[in-house]
């Protein structure tokens, strides 16, 4: 697949053949712009306000994103349990997947978002088998909703991510990747739980992940060293990169404010590509204008 064609079905064998692609930006901060309250479980919008979820997804497609996520970061029975909604994991996951698939409209791939479950396996707060089962349940619903691949993202606990990866890979037959949040150490090459880039890469490769990478944690301007560290581990797994819009500050209402301009994202694209990034997008604070800047720069550099 030297050319981008989202009508070609992704498999665990052909994903590595994709050309570098532009991924979407943040979902949470975009939903806050649409009226979400800080801390609200916006996955419920998949049922209660699907038109708002569709707007976020379709705005990213219009901006040039070739990969968009789903509004299912918290649609996992363990994460939903504390809100009394564990039994809605499948419903919310299917609905979120279907909304993004409709918004993609044949112009982008849909990678389903699975976030942390909210309990640490490595701290003994939950058994790995429970994480595996919950991830499998969510993965089945996401594929039923039409997603092309799955990304287990914003991870910090190696044991949780491994358990979730195993659950997804056993339950469905689509590519599954893992993305960790690195924000500790001299070059931000460790998660807050002390997990290194090398540990993440080795775990992902050993367990059959189709791609690996980093999201959130730090601003996009700090991601090139992280990507180079991943590349130094080997060339077997395509690299996924989604950085925040700079370092946040605290707003008047207690919310986090991100101020990095689209130009900053455009300015780091070449370095990220040279470092080995295959998917480049934004995380917290980034919006369609940031993704448009990435997409335009990638077109210029790769044409």
Image (cartoon, grey):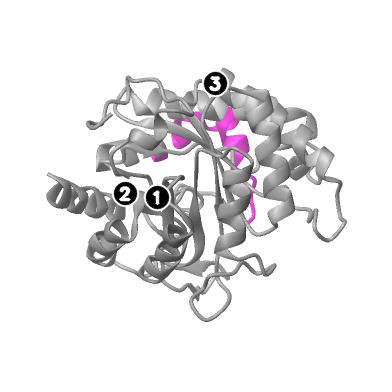
Q: Earlier in the sequence, mark 3 or mark 2?
A: 3
Relative side of 136 to 65, left or right: right
Q: Tell me the crowding category of disc 1: few under 14, some 14 to 19, or many 20 or more residues within 10 angstroms, Cα based.
A: many
Q: Tell me the crowding category of disc 3: few under 14, some 14 to 19, or many 20 or more residues within 10 angstroms, Cα based.
A: many
Q: Are marks 1 and 2 in contact (CB under 8 Å)?
A: yes
In-front residue for pair 31/274: 274
Mark whose residue sits in front, 1 or 2: 1
Q: Is residue 81 visible?
A: no
Q: Earlier in the sequence, mark 1 or mark 2?
A: 1
Residue 98 in percent (x, y) is at 50, 23
In-front residue for pair 250/130: 130
Q: Which residue is mark 2?
A: 288
Q: Are marks 3 and 1 in contact (CB under 8 Å)?
A: no
Whether residue 48 is situated above or below residue 260 in the rendered picture: above
Residue 296 in percent (x, y) is at 18, 49
Residue, x 83% and y 39% (percent of image)?
129
Whether residue 170 is situated above or below residue 218 in the rendered picture: above
Relative side of 266 to 190, left or right: left
Whether residue 233 is situated above or below residue 3 in the rendered picture: below
Count of marks, rendered view: 3
- Please provide the residue range marked out in magenta: 38-56
Whether residue 227 is situated above or below residue 74 in the rendered picture: below
Residue, x 42% and y 25% (percent of image)?
10
- Residues at marks 3 and 2, CA–CA distance in whole angstroms: 24 Å
Q: Which element is circle 1 on?
A: loop
Residue, x 51% and y 31% (percent of image)?
175
Q: Which mark is residue 25?
A: 1
Q: Which residue is mark 3?
A: 145
Q: Earlier in the sequence, mark 3 or mark 1?
A: 1
Q: Which element is circle 2 on?
A: helix
């Amino acid at each position: 697949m030297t050319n981008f064609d989202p009508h070609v079905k992704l498999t665990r064998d052909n994903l590595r053949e994709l050309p570098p692609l532009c991924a979407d930006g943040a979902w949470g901060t975009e939903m806050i712009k649409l009226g979400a309250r800080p801390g609200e479980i916006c996955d419920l919008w998949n049922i209660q306000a699907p038109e708002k979820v569709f707007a976020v997804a379709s705005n990213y497609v219009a901006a040039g994103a070739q990969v968009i996520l789903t509004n299912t970061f918290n649609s996992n029975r363990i994460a939903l349990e504390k809100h009394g909604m564990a039994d809605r994991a499948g419903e919310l996951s299917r609905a979120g997947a279907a909304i993004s698939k409709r918004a993609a409209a044949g112009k982008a791939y849909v990678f389903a978002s699975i976030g942390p479950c909210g309990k640490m396996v490595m701290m003994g707060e939950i058994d790995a088998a429970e994480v595996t089962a919950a991830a499998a349940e969510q993965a089945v619903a996401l594929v039923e909703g039409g997603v092309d691949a799955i990304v287990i993202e914003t991870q910090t606990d190696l044991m949780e991510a491994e358990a979730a990866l195993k659950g997804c890979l056993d339950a469905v037959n689509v590519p599954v990747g893992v993305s960790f949040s690195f924000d500790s150490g001299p070059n931000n090459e460790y998660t807050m739980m002390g997990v290194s880039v090398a540990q993440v890469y080795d775990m992902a490769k050993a367990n059959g992940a189709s791609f690996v990478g980093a999201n959130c944690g730090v601003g996009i301007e700090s991601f090139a060293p992280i990507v180079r560290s991943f590349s130094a581990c080997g060339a077997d797994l395509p690299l996924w990169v989604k950085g925040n819009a700079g370092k946040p500050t605290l707003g008047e209402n207690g919310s986090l404010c991100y101020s990095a301009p689209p130009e900053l994202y455009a300015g780091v694209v070449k370095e990220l590509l040279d470092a080995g990034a295959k998917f480049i997008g934004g995380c917290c604070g980034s919006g369609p204008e940031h993704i448009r800047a990435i997409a335009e720069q990638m077109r210029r550099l790769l044409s």
